[in-house]
Image (spheres, grey):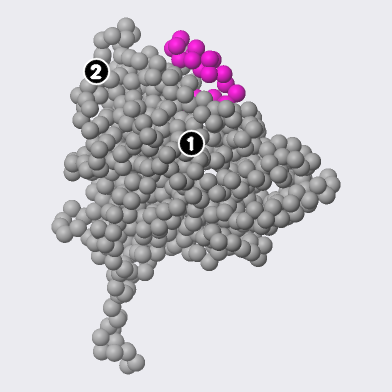
Amino acid sequence: MGEKGIIEHPELLKLGEPLPPGNPHGISVHLPTWEDTLGWAKRDPRVVDTMKTGYPRFFIPRVVERLADRLLEHFAQLRSHSDNDFDLKNKHALIVSTGHHALMCRQFFRQKFDSTPDQKVTFPILIVHWDGTISLVPEHHQHHLPTIKAQPPQPPLGQEDIFLVPYPIDMFPFAKSFWQHTGFGISSRRATYWMDFAPFFFPSSPPTSTSSDHPPKPPTPITFNQGDTTTALSLLRTRLAKSYSTPFSPVSPSDIFLYPTGMSSTAALSSAIKSLVLSTPSSTPNHLVPSAHSPPRTPTVALYGFLYVDTLKLLSTLLGFTLHLFPYSTPLSSLSQSLASGDLQIDLLVTEFPGNPLMQSPDVSELYELSRRHGFALVVDDTVGGTGANVNVLGKSDAVVSSLTKMVSGGCDVMGGCLVLNPGGNGYGVLKGMLEGGDMNGGMDGGGTMDGDGKGAGEERKRDSGYAADIESKDKAVGNGIKEEIKGETTSKKQGAQRREEERAWFPADIAVMERNSRDFVHRVRKASANAEWLVHNLLRPHASVQEVYYPKESLTEDIYEQFRVKPTADENEGEGGYGFLVSIKFLTPAKARAFYDAMAVAKGPSLGTNFTLCSAYTLLAHYRELEWAAEFGVVEDLVRISVGLEDKEWLGERVSRALKAAWECEE
């Protein structure tokens, strides 16, 4: 097989082996049987202890955990002769790359810690410098923390400060949820770099009779060239801008914001919108005269469809949005009536196009009209849609977020995310200004508590406060100034501060891998999509063991998908967009689903959008602790999801046919 990144003999893979095999930075892990997947969901030691890695947000990389332990030990040694009473006993720590993320983490821990009168726990932040010095930021410090040391000169690229937030070991579930839902944790490549090269991990030792007269020197760090990293980021932005551009609506590279993970891009945009809401006081009862004494109302978000679990929990649990869930079966006429009557007041609506795992396509044109009419922001996650390669919904949204970890990389060995602003979107100038360098402290530190019925205190009519009002007032001040940047990528130092901080959080080696992997992503998205369409039409839908196949083509929402499917243009040599590389299957019985999964001789584990075909027991991996809730949306426990790769059709067909045969022969 000629395509890169193929696993030719996945049947030889062992439980817990990284995917791709042998790659220390692989972001998936092989779970060969249904029972293995169930074991991971239950955190069975038989499975967990065997895993060398896992999806980096669901499974904190082991090298990151080792680094956290060593840094805490190092800090304890530094403080051993101090009278400071900071206690590291029974503590672990999360490691993040920016001060802003550390502050958000600390605030989250404060909210979740169940204190008692006789137990005082503080959550300081430790800033670790490359030379081994550590600055302790006390609990009461609320100001923005620097990403790098304030004293010149700046450290070389890749050797920036990292931030530790220690916590009691029994709070690990909360620490894990912050790591998972935000995507703020450092990457395995950054952790490995520190472990391999940080000089204070290699103390000089006195010479021995068998050694030279000179103590050993620490290894020389690999150097990263700032120009190369800047070029790689520019290439990524240009590549993505081309993917989202149309002949009538070009997208500037400056409208592409890059992040270390897909979830961190969603967090950045949601935090910006929350800040806008909190910066606008609630209206007085007559909705006309602003009152500076009114408390800020809780920002409110609607999720339309069955969204990725981490999107839901990021917005509600961590960012404190009041949450409204609307399944795809919700008529948009009903949603429109609720908005028009004032019964529903929202600042943000998030949806996926198409949705994972049931592949429905929401009517984003109608949702966009509602957002215009009622003054909320519409954000679409198009990861499954191929990040602009298969479908392009940017023109009918205020922003698109996408996980570059998936098919844009395809290599299954690096994380990344992007946020794309629609130049014609509502509040484009204000949002862009905030993402470039505005106040981003509307995250965890901005309140966001909910009262018993889930409604924000002091909540008033939508168009009189919050996102819509702030956009209306600030957009007049901003005018079209930022819009002029569509012709170029340059931004002022002040405007670019936030963008630079987020991009500095993305480790240079990860950026280089992502740039290299992404060079032919449009071709790979469309080839994998053609393979998936062939499997659905020729093998899956016709088979007697299959009850339903979830795929955009020939679905109930195919006509909506078709409206946004990328069509070829005169200067386009990549062809047209396909119907996606992701397929979900519901079998006649749970036993047939398990027989199919166990017999499927491909890589099996979390994630999607890999160059190699990747099968998963999706609901067990993503929703094991809320199976009944997921089933209410049609996401049943025995759903099998296949992310189709770039292999030859004959190779794929033989393996899928064999698995279907096993499902057919399975008896209850």
Residue 49: mark in rendering: none
Label 1 residue SS: loop
- The residue sitting at 32% across, 18% down in the picture is 465
Q: Residue 520, image x and y in percent?
A: 45, 52
Q: In the rendered structure, which amino acid carries the disc numbered 1? A: Lys
Magenta span contains residue 92? no
- The residue sitting at 25% across, 58% down in the picture is 227
In this rendering, the answer to whether 508 lies above or below 215 is above
**Foreground: 121 or 229?**
229
Q: CA distance from mark 1 to mark 2?
A: 51 Å
Q: Residue 666, image x and y in percent?
A: 82, 48
Q: In the rendered structure, which amino acid carries the disc numbered 2? A: Ala
Locate the C terminus by quadrant. top right
Label 2 residue SS: loop
Task: Point out the residue furthest to the bottom here.
Answer: 209
- Residue bounds of the magenta highlight: 318-342
Q: Image quarter for residue 590?
A: top right
Is 33 placed left or right of 130 in the picture?
right
Alpha-carbon neighbours of circle 1 within 10 Å: few (<14), some, or many (≥20)?
some
Answer yes or no: is residue 107 visible: no
Is 565 placed left or right of 14 in the picture?
left
Residue under label 1, please give it: 567
Q: Nearer the viewer, mark 1 or mark 2?
A: 1
- The residue sitting at 64% across, 41% down in the picture is 584
**Foreground: 369 or 351?**
369
Q: Image quarter for residue 482?
A: top left
**Foreground: 526 or 629?**
526
Magenta span contains residue 330? yes
Residue under label 2, please give it: 292
